[in-house]
Amino acid sequence: MRSLPETAALLEDGTLSAATLVEECLARIADPDGQGSRVFLKLHAAEARAMADAIDRLRRAGRAPSPYAGIPLGLKDLFDIQGEPTQAGSRALAAAPPAARHAPAVARLLAAGMIPLGRTNMTEFAYSGLGINPHFGTPLSPWDRASGHVPGGSSSGSAVAVADGMALAALGTDTGGSCRIPAAFCGVVGYKPTARRVPIEGVLPLATSLDSVGPLATSVASAAVIDALLAAEPPTLPEPASLSALRLAIPAPFALDGMDEAVAAAFGAACTRLSAAGAHLEERSFAPLSRFPRFLDHGGIAAAEAYAWHRTLIAGHGAEYDQRVRRRIEQGARQSAADYIAILEDRTAFIRDMNAATAGIDALLMPTVPIVPPRLADLEADADYNRANLLVLRNTMPANLLDRCALSLPITRPGEPPVGLMLVGETMGDQRLFAIAAGIERTLG
């Protein structure tokens, strides 16, 4: 798959046009044998073609707004687009009023000349790590598609769009792993930034204390470009870090429990190659992680904040919800104000203690998800769904609680069970994490 920097170079020298890129993506979306009808909830084909023609003219005149102008991307159905309702993958918001303006994240990508192809599917209201949507259908992971494996969530459509070449990049959100889990399940790169770097205004919230906006893309460099544009920073490409003397800590047993054979084999092979390249890997038990289950009580922070936003909508349109999502949100009703204040205080202590415990470590290293994507048919029972959902979120959620940056990159080949390798950096250490990830990506190939 072509990266954004590679595509920008082809656009600049005239080898490729924005119009051609858009038509290639639209053709993949329209393929009756593909996932396009489940990936895109709304397609902006006419607008995308008009933008591509305009950008091609601007580039010929030397006036392209950025080197990345003309690159097609998908937008998760959580982002406000001026003149359209934001439905968040739900039937309950079918009558929502149109947005008065673009979300800042969308506006920044438009200002760079990137071309939105449409709204991508997602878990309803972003509240699950599996990616299932009973209202609009569930796009499938590219792996063993005939068997029907889940794509990961909640940014399911964004991940499948990138994996299948329907878009060169896509916008997602990450509250507990919603960029990184689908990236791992679909064999692409997913990034969760330090949340404060990218505005969440105009993004329908799940939990405002934990929500972040991040990209899904084909490479570390591509994710870094989108992240920089979202953060209103110069989109410089990361210089791959030398792995020599790099200190990477594997949180054990926390992050390694419950690994299936495919994940254990791929993670072990990646660790062996990183060690051979000079990186210092160490399995360590981090005492603060033993307190992680506390943050799941009655749905934790996410359920409390989600219920505060949803309670009025549920009162009027509760029957239109995915009932599994509704039940998770309603856990927040069982928390008192004292419960919520206590868990926020626990989070402050968790951040303080983990910061002290990880001092001197360049990044945490672990499998993004301890299992490969389950089959959709195997999650019909609520007990199986809930068990799988908790397991896929376990390794990713701490980075949100800690407000750290984190990245998942694929470490298996197409056709093999998809496995993601996750790196967790420091708060506001995003540029350093991109450099480390680029070095690891180069080493693993």
Image: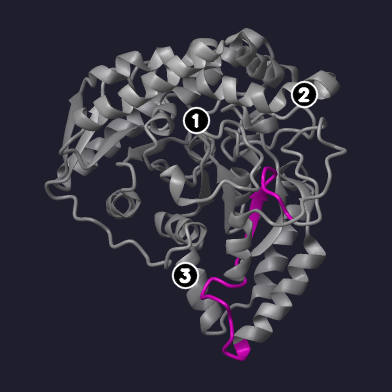
Relative image position of residue 48 (x, y in whole percent):
74, 66
Judge from the rendering whether residue 71 lies leftward or rightward of residue 51; answer left or right: left
Q: Is residue 192 visible?
A: no
Range of residues picked out in magenta:
60-81
Relative image position of residue 42 (x, y in whole percent):
79, 49
x 41%, y 33%: residue = 368
* Rendered view: 233 above or below 325: below
Relative image position of residue 428 (x, y in whole percent):
34, 47
Residue 77 colored in magenta in the image: yes
Mark 3 is on which residue type? Glu
State the residue position of label 2.
Answer: 312
x 39%, y 20%: residue = 345
Mark 2 / mark 3, whichever is N-terminal: 3
Mark 1 is on which residue type? Gly
Q: Which mark is residue 176?
A: 1
Circles 3 and 1: CB atoms closer than 8 Å: no
Label 3 packing within 10 angstroms: few (<14), some (14-19), many (20+)? few
Q: Which mark is residue 59?
A: none
Relative image position of residue 174 (x, y in whole percent):
52, 38
State the residue position of label 3.
Answer: 6
x 50%, y 65%: residue = 4
Mark 3 / mark 1, whichever is N-terminal: 3
